[in-house]
Image (cartoon, rainbow, N blue to C red):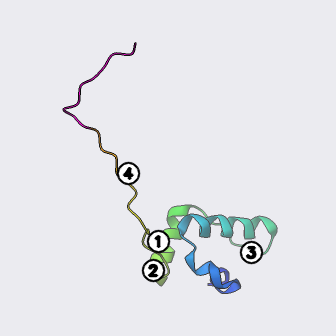
Amino acid sequence: MIIHNEDIYNDTYGRERMYLALQQRYEEGKSDIPVPSEGTVRKIMEKIGIIHKPRRKANGITKADREARVYADA
C-alpha cells in the first residue's frame, strides 16, 4: 500500500509494474523483503483487493480465415 500512496497515479499499477516497483525498492535498500515472483505479487494484490481488470481483451481482432486460399511464395 505504500507504493500506492506515494503518488495519485500509482493506483493504476498492475501486477507487472508492482512487481518491478517492489524489486527496485529491494535493490535500492528501501525494503528488506525480497519478492519471490510476479505470481506471488498477483496473489497478494488479489487478496487485499487492489488488482485491476485489464482495460481491453488480450487477443487481437484479426482472425485467420480458414477458407482463404493459401498462396505459395513467388
User: Viewer-nearest of labels 4 and 1?
Assistant: 4
Label 2, label 3: how far apart the Cα atoms are: 21 Å
The reply to whether the magenta stretch includes residue 70 is yes
User: Viewer-nearest of labels 4 and 2?
Assistant: 4
Label 4, label 3: how far apart the Cα atoms are: 39 Å
CB contact under 8 Å: marks 2 and 3: no
Residue at image position (52%, 67%) is: 40
CB contact under 8 Å: marks 1 and 2: yes
Residue 72: horizontal and vertical position, in percent?
33, 16
**Label 1: element kind:** helix
Which residue in the structure is indicated by mark 2?
47
The reply to whether the magenta stretch includes residue 2 is no
Residue 62: horizontal and vertical position, in percent?
34, 46
Which residue in the structure is indicated by mark 4?
60
Give the dominant element type of the magenta stretch: helix, strand or loop.
loop
Residue at image position (38%, 61%) is: 57
User: Magenta span covers which residues?
Assistant: 65-74
- Outermost residue toward the right in this view: 28
Indicate the amino acid at tag 3: Ser
